[in-house]
Image (spheres, rainbow, N blue to C red):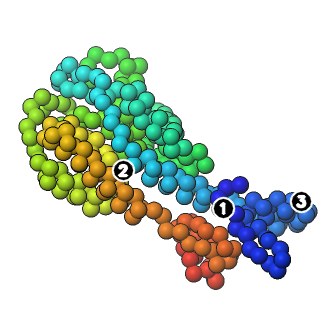
Amino acid sequence: MSGEKQVEAVGNLIVDYHPDTLVANAFSSGARLDLIEKLMELKEKHDKAEAKKAFFKAMASFNKEIIIVKDDKKNTQYNSSYSSKGNLVNTVSPFLGKNGLFHTFDIHQNDGSIEVTCTITHEMGHSISVEMSSPPDKSGNKNAIQQIKSTKTYLEIATFESVTGVASSISSDDEDGNSYGKKTKKRDMQGWKDFIDDLAESGKGVNNLSYQYGKNEDQIKYDLSADEVKVLINYVSQNKKMLIDNEKPKMVSCPENGLEMVETDCNDQECKKTCKNFKGE
């Protein structure tokens, strides 16, 4: 059974109000079909709420991980480094799996455009997705298949980084790599702490903080000593914890059936006259 049991003492009896138990009892007692259908709907809502809570908890745990994706490929045209899709995915996937999460790619072609969707799913069923599209990459001397494969690979990397909030360690806003190798010091320790504070206060959440730290990690290591980097990593972890605590979904207890659910999931038309948490129209 999903979630904790909801039980109540009635006289000398212990009554279990968990939706799974209610449905099982209804079947075993030969209850009316309409009652069973109502209980099944209640169970479905409860299971979705439990799956969403489990997903948020797993993502919060995943975002506490310090994941370093090293660039393993060289772009000879621009003398820049980058991470291959295989290296990125193989580095991050064990951390996803550790937290009960996994990723999938969905690929379509539509009017000459290639569409890639990366989805992160929790073992209890809740998921989030990021979708991107682009025409085939016709740069260089690629044939038609190579054009499609190049775009597909780029979109898979971009959507995977976006939905997980993880990026390779050697990155730059200068995507073509022309400035690679011309590195100069940008910030001291206080400057990088101020940078982290700005990210934490931006309202973009913990995934963006993780992404931006990974994106700037090579510069951070260039600017700071090894001991200072350790201090900054701890500072980042503290800010992540603060953001995670602030992003936890607000839970409410339904006054009609006593079940705990995510507040925004409460949309029961039958309860709207009496339920103070009703969010529907």
Q: In which quadrant of the rendered image does the N terminus lie?
A: bottom right
Q: Amino acid at mark 1?
A: Glu
Task: Give the residue at the far front of this rendering.
Answer: 227
Relative to 30, say whether 136 is above or below.
above
Secondary structure beneath label 3: helix
Q: Earlier in the sequence, mark 3 or mark 1?
A: 1
Say which residue appears at 31% left-offset and 45% top-offset: 211
Q: Amino acid at mark 2?
A: Asn
Q: Left or right of 14: which side holds 186?
A: left
Q: Amino acid at mark 3?
A: Ser
Circle on res. 4? 1
Q: Left or right of 131: which side holds 125?
A: right
Q: Earlier in the sequence, mark 3 or mark 2?
A: 3
Say which residue appears at 56% left-offset and 77% top-offset: 277
Residue 99 is situated, as x and y percent measured from the top left of the image, at 51, 44
Circle on res. 33? none
Relative to 8, say whether 161 is above or below.
above
User: Does residue 173 show up?
Assistant: no
Circle on res. 207? 2
Task: Give the residue at the far bottom of this rendering.
Answer: 274
User: Does residue 201 show up?
Assistant: yes
Q: CA distance from mark 2 to mark 1?
A: 29 Å
Residue 147 is situated, as x and y percent measured from the top left of the image, at 36, 23
Say which residue appears at 56% left-offset and 51% top-offset: 126
Residue 239 is situated, as x and y percent measured from the top left of the image, at 31, 57
Residue at mark 3? 28
